[in-house]
């Protein structure tokens, strides 16, 4: 897929569709969203990622109008949303609990929003059957929600929120109950819909692969705060904190102290071992405590000490996770630190070069690791 | 085997408490009035054997049912009972639904208290409560005294011994039967459904019509039946609060039994009343069946 040039957040002239300005949400004395300021642009596919209870649903509910910010304002297309009730917002939400109407059939559930708009009957029928086709629910149109499976219910909820083709669509874990195949198909379908309709999507997901696949930007949340919001590639390649690095994908964190050297820093981590080296434009003082984050697929694993690599460590394989196309080796250094290394399984399993208890060398390039302050 | 036993229990219950009394009443309704104890004939005399049974059945006839059609008192009483019961049921629904709705939307820790308050009147005798309404509604009663005191009226209102008093009595007495099933239905409802409805463009009011009402439909129907059925045959409330103006079949039944001592005619009145009640129950069952088939 060719790289899209769609980066309104880097364009100072771009007008954001949604603006959070110092938004705080408290329930009693519990702070669910903590003073957040950020923008979401038109046609974006904005993914919220974070552990359970970090405030993702609360964020969505404020956008939909079910919760009012305790402090701060939310603007939609430049207009303050606070006084606008949910039914007057050009926003539709797919609820985490689906919230399907139990007394209505699948067909009527999907048609519900369209009927409220008072559209002509044949237009409604056409739109509903389009949605049924999209979510592959044609066969279940007449059933009630309690007569279909969990995954089918999820698709009804998705179809219902898509039906009105809103300006902003909020999807709270839209695909969690689908099997891998259907999930992937629906992800591409969502991206397709987005391309065709120009709808802005905000999507909550627990599946980082999903976030990476569909999102234009991913926001990693923790404890009511967005820790980092950036493109999937930048979130993965240059996380701004150990939290983000650890949350997205697999990573090894090595703690040490930094000392300026050339384009980057030398990091001494264990007494008696040579310092590691990482290129970095971070501004660190000498002797500062830092964290080195290394993705397993950037670590090379060899039997002999590699020549001309500054970052080389010796250790023993203590675990191998076989994932089909790749294997992850857990290598213990003499200090006890575990470093993960990943290799593609291009050969058959029986001809694998390393096994448990093997002494191996791990190495990576000067630019492979990311240096983090916290 | 176990299943058969389990199913048998409710049927035996029904047999003992409904079918047997009904057959006895039906039998009396087919008998003739007599100056005797019990005050009707024939009575089954098994000592004469087969001939006795034959004579017994030979003496039964539909004369009393025929009699009911000759005096327009009876059909008027039935009609007015049904009418009063329908209006009273609707009034109870009108009063009960908001109360149930309020209870279901009250904070969690309030609900047990509210529930208790709804059931509380049952702790005193029904008769005493209806009598106290006489004290409230009479011309010199508390209500009139209060209204005169506020200056809203200058003459006392005549409420007691009018149909209005009957409606007040019925709504008051049967309100809990309306509230409880509706409350149960509303309490089960998932609040996010209303949010979903609003999200899809409903105002609060239309969300209420399109979601809350349909989802509490079963509670409404159950509540209406629980009020309607006993109200049709109601005797105490119309005779204490309704005066001579209010014609209800329960009162007619009472008079036939105790004033005229005409058990056979009274029984015939009761049998017809039962038939009237069975019609809506069957309709209700049909409706449920149809819903289930549409779902299935
Ligand atoms: N109405 C409420 N009253 C009190 N606390 C609330 C309320 N709604 C949410 N919270 C709290 O706010 C925090 C954030 O909740 P939220 O539902 O946004 O989490 P989430 O990120 O969506 O989690 P999940 O991934 O499990 O869905 C949680 O700790 C939750 O307990
Ligand atoms: Mg959530």
Image: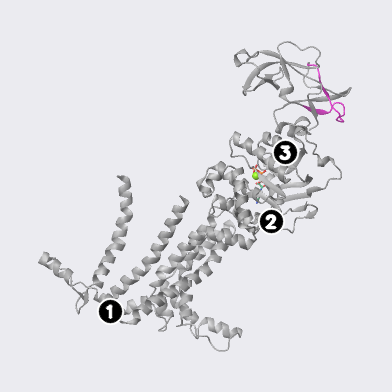
Magenta stretch bounds: A273-292
Judge whether residue A96 can be spotted in this image.
no
Name the residue rendered at 69%, 28% in the picture. A250
Which mark is in front, 2 or 3? 3
Q: Residues within 10 Å of mark 1 (few under 14, many from 20)?
A: few
Residue A311: which quarter of the image?
top right
Q: Chain of mark 3?
A: A
Which residue was labeled with disc 1?
B67
Query: If the image is split into quadrants, where does the N terminus of chain B sit?
Result: top left
Whether callout 1 and callout 3 share a subunit is answered: no
Image coordinates of residue B46 in percent, x first then y, are 13, 65
Does residue A286 show up magenta in the picture? Answer: yes
Image coordinates of residue B284 in percent, x first then y, are 42, 62
Relative depth, front residue between B172 and A325: A325
Judge whether residue B46 can be spotted in this image.
yes
Which residue was labeled with disc 2?
A86
Which residue was labeled with disc 3?
A215
Does residue B64 show up magenta in the picture? Answer: no
Total labels: the figure holds 3
């Amino acid at each position: 897929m060719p790289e899209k040039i769609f980066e309104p957040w880097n364009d100072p002239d771009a007008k954001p569709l949604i603006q959070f300005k110092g938004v705080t949400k408290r329930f009693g004395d519990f702070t669910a969203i903590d003073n957040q300021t950020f923008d979401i642009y038109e046609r974006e596919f904005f993914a919220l990622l974070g552990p359970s209870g970090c405030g993702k649903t609360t964020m969505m509910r404020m956008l939909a109008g079910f919760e009012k910010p305790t402090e701060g304002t939310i603007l939609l297309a430049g207009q303050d949303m606070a006084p606008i009730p949910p039914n007057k917002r050009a926003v539709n939400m797919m609820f985490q609990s689906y919230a399907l109407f139990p007394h209505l059939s699948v067909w009527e559930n999907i048609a519900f929003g369209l009927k409220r708009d008072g559209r002509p009957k044949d237009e409604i029928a056409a739109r509903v059957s389009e949605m049924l086709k999209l979510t592959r629910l044609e066969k279940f149109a007449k059933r009630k929600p309690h007569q279909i499976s969990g995954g089918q219910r999820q698709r009804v909820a998705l179809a219902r929120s898509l039906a009105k083709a809103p300006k902003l669509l909020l999807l709270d874990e839209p695909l969690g109950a689908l099997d891998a195949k259907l999930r992937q198909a629906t992800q591409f379908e969502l991206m397709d819909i987005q391309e065709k309709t120009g709808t802005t999507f905000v999507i909550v997901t627990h599946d980082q692969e999903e976030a990476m696949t569909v999102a234009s930007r991913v926001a990693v949340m923790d404890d009511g705060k967005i820790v980092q919001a950036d493109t999937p590639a930048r979130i993965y390649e240059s996380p701004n904190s150990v939290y983000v690095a650890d949350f997205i994908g697999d990573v090894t964190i090595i703690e040490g102290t930094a000392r300026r050297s050339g384009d980057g820093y030398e990091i001494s981590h264990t007494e008696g071992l040579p310092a590691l080296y990482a290129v970095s434009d971070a501004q660190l003082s000498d002797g500062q405590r830092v964290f080195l984050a290394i993705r397993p697929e950037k670590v090379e694993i060899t039997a002999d000490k590699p020549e001309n690599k500054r970052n080389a460590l010796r250790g023993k394989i203590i675990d191998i996770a076989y994932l089909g196309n790749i294997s992850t080796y857990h290598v213990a250094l003499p200090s006890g630190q575990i470093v993960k290394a990943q290799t593609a399984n291009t050969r058959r399993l029986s001809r694998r070069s390393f096994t448990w208890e093997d002494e191996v060398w791990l190495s990576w390039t000067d630019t492979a690791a990311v240096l983090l302050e916290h | 085997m176990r299943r058969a036993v389990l199913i048998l229990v409710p049927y035996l219950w029904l047999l003992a408490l409904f079918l047997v009394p009904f057959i006895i009443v039906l039998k009396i309704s087919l008998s003739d009035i007599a100056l005797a104890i019990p005050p009707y004939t024939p009575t089954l005399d098994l000592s004469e054997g087969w001939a006795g049974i034959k004579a017994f059945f030979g003496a039964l006839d539909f004369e009393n049912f025929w009699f009911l059609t000759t005096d327009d008192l009876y059909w008027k009483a039935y009609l007015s009972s049904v009418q009063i019961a329908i209006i009273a049921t609707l009034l109870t629904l009108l009063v009960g639904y908001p109360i149930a709705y309020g209870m279901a939307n009250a904070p969690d820790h309030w609900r047990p208290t509210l529930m208790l308050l709804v059931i509380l009147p049952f702790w005193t005798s029904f008769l005493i409560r209806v009598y106290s309404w006489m004290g409230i509604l009479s011309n010199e009663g508390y209500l009139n005294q209060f209204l005169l005191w506020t200056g809203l009226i200058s003459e006392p209102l005549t409420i007691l011994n009018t149909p209005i008093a009957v409606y007040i009595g019925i709504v008051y007495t049967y309100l809990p039967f309306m509230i409880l099933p509706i409350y149960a239905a509303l309490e089960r409802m998932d609040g996010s459904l209303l949010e979903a409805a609003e999200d899809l463009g409903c105002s609060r009011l239309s969300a209420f019509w399109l979601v809350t009402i349909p989802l509490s439909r079963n509670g409404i129907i159950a509540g209406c039946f629980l009020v309607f059925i006993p109200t049709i045959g109601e005797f105490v409330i119309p005779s204490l609060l309704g005066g001579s103006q209010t014609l209800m079949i329960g009162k007619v039944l009472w008079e036939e039994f105790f004033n005229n001592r005409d058990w056979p005619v009274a029984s015939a009145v009761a049998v017809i009343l039962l038939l009237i009640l069975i019609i809506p129950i069957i309709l209700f069952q049909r409706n449920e069946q149809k819903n289930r088939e549409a779902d299935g």
